Amino acid sequence: MSKDAANPPSLSEAIADYAVNLKYESLPPEVVRTAKRIVLDTIGCAIGGHNSGPARIAQQIAARFSSQPPATVMCSGLKTSHDMAVFANGVMIRYLDFNDGFISKASGHPSDILASVLTTAEVCGRSGRDLIAALVAAYEVFAHFADVIETRALGLDQSTILGLAALAGTAKLMGLSRDQLVNAIGITVGGNTAINQGRVGTLSNWKNYATSEASRKAVFSAMLAQAGMSGPREVFEGRDGWMNAIYRKPFTLAPWGGEPYGIMRALTKRFALGQYSQTVAQAALEARAQCRSPDEIAEVNVRVSRSAIRVMAASPEKWRPQTHETADHSMPYATGVALMYGAVTADHYEAPYLHDEKLLALVAKVKVHPSEEADRREGEINLCDLELVLNSGARHEVRVEYHRGHHKNPMTDAEMEEKFRGLAAKHLKAGRLDALLKQLWKIDEMPLAGKLIDLTLVS
């Protein structure tokens, strides 16, 4: 038996080996292209959400800090500390619930990680190619854990593994050694296990900043380790480590460096709402053509997986949401909005829509049922079967397996640009918007990736 076989690396060491050693030059062209599309989409979401209430609060707090070198908050140009810029940028990325998604045993929004890698690329003077490699490494860490750990079954929030993924990308850009990254992983995992209560019932602003806070902590963990601080090296396998204390049993991850890359399995959102409702909203829009008026609708039956129901239709608040965060995570509300207005936008999660009794009466007609087929296939697709029952007794059925934006039904580059323009046009002058969009397609040619932030400044 070889020495390596007799003493395999710990999980922290395996993560560190992969993140430190991944090279841009080893990435297939389709992975680089997908990474650029994700950066484009995520920055569009950030611009669209930069003036939201939670984003303004994050910027007010960030304004209290300064550092050398400084870091820049997107859209405002505010100079602050490295970790607070990550936090503020992350909140604006997440607010609209319009950035990418990932569904496996765990689900989440891995493009939240862009706040940490883009900010770190700026602070550390890294190139566009460096940023792409860091982003791909971070997605790999997230996907490896998401394929094994059922976070919701453990009562954990997605930010628990997103923070670790953000650390991998951040540390790579900061130039941490393998040993330093192992220590940083111990610091991050040991102090960043988040519970899922913030994503059930009536949702609060926490939904908008949970992963931003995890990413902020990840940056600080990397700073500590780079300066020489040590962390628990057996944070996963140790007696009181994550496997025993949280997961309650050992687990293994897939081999590192295999295909498909995690970033290739992320989905793009066509609608500004939770990822489990993307197929539902599309089905409702298709079904809408079967009636002349929403007044003709007697009942709507939606059949989806139990996982989708747990996230987006498991409590009374989903039928009468009182907050933006609850509304954009409500399957019945999204169904009602699509049927009544023929569109689902972020504006529909605010007053006066939230309190429109006519809309809420239609939402009350939506029934959500578990589907055995959707349960069986949820690792592959987010299946939705929607039945529209009219007052006349007529019934119309629509099935959506892969919504537009799923990696098996991807949006075209033109559709990605259209979504970006729809998000950014209200905030950027046409010339700046065009320059930013042009540069986003050429990230891999940028000697300083942080210059992208300058192009997001709102005049």
Image (cartoon, rainbow, N blue to C red):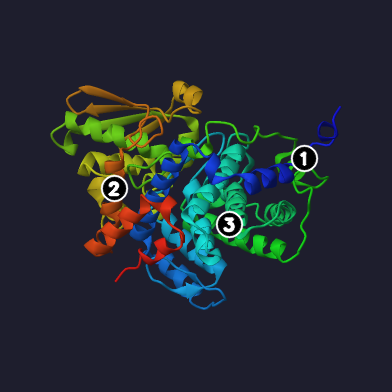
* Distance from Cα at disc 1 to Cα at disc 2: 43 Å
Q: Which residue is mark 2?
A: 417
Left or right: residue 71 compared with residue 417 = right
Residue occupying image coordinates x 28% and y 49%: 345
* Distance from Cα at disc 3 to Cα at disc 2: 28 Å
The picture places residue 450, in percent across and down from the top left corner, at 46, 62
> Which secondary structure, mark 2?
helix
Left or right: residue 381 compared with residue 389 = right
* Mark number displayed over residue 193: none
Left or right: residue 200 compared with residue 43 = right
- In the image, residue 234 above or below residue 31: below
Quarter location, residue 407: top left
Residue at the farthest left position: 292
The picture places residue 358, in percent across and down from the top left corner, at 23, 47
* Residue nearest the viewer, comparing 335 with 15: 15
- In the image, residue 72 above or below residue 131: below
Q: Which residue is mark 3?
A: 173
